Amino acid sequence: MTILEQAQRDLFKESDSEAELAKRESEKFRKMAICPACEEREKNVILARCSHTFCRECVLANVQARKRSCPVCMMKFGMDDIKPLHL
Ligand SMILES: [Zn+2]
Ligand SMILES: [Zn+2]
């Protein structure tokens, strides 16, 4: 077998794992939909001030703790800035 044939075989092997690649892609999108504060629930609210997205539970916990600042960028927000997120 020539080096070229070997290289072509390796290339074919890689394209063979397309399913694996698709799995990794969907995992990436799943992570994008997950709240960065708790990393377990899906995002369903957006802070209008800074456009960061979280799950409602984390935002409400933040409000109840009287912080009212975005867990990601620390921007202060009011109750009016909490908007439902439609993906
Ligand atoms: Zn959360
Ligand atoms: Zn923010």
Image (cartoon, rainbow, N blue to C red):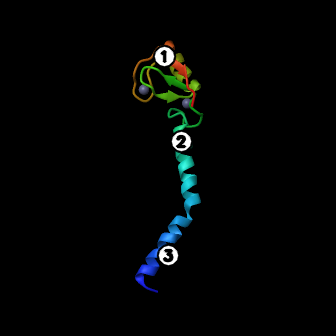
Q: Is residue 74 visible?
A: yes
- Amino acid type indicated by mark 3: Arg
Residue carrying label 2: 31
- Amino acid type indicated by mark 1: Asp
Q: Secondary structure at mark 2?
A: helix
Q: How far apart are the two marked residues, 2 and 1, measured between alpha carbons?
A: 24 Å
- Residue 51 percent across, percent down from the top left: 45, 26
- Depth check, mark 2 against mark 3: the one in front is 3
Q: Is residue 65 visible?
A: no
- Going from the N terminus, do you reach mark 2 or mark 1 first? 2
Q: Looking at this view, is 9 or 67 the one in front?
A: 9
Residue carrying label 1: 81
- Going from the N terminus, do you reach mark 2 or mark 3 first? 3
Rate crowding at label 1 as few (under 14), some (14 to 19) or many (20 or more) other CA atoms within 10 Å: some
Q: Would the CB of label 2 be found within 8 Å of ligand 1?
A: no
- Amino acid type indicated by mark 2: Lys
Q: Quadrant of residue 43?
A: top right
Q: Residue furthest bottom?
A: 1
Q: Residue at x 54, y 17 (%)?
A: 64
- Residue 71 percent across, percent down from the top left: 45, 27
Q: Secondary structure at mark 1?
A: helix
Q: Quadrant of the C terminus?
A: top right
Q: How far apart are the two marked residues, 2 and 3, measured between alpha carbons?
A: 34 Å
Residue carrying label 3: 9
- Residue 7 percent across, percent down from the top left: 44, 76
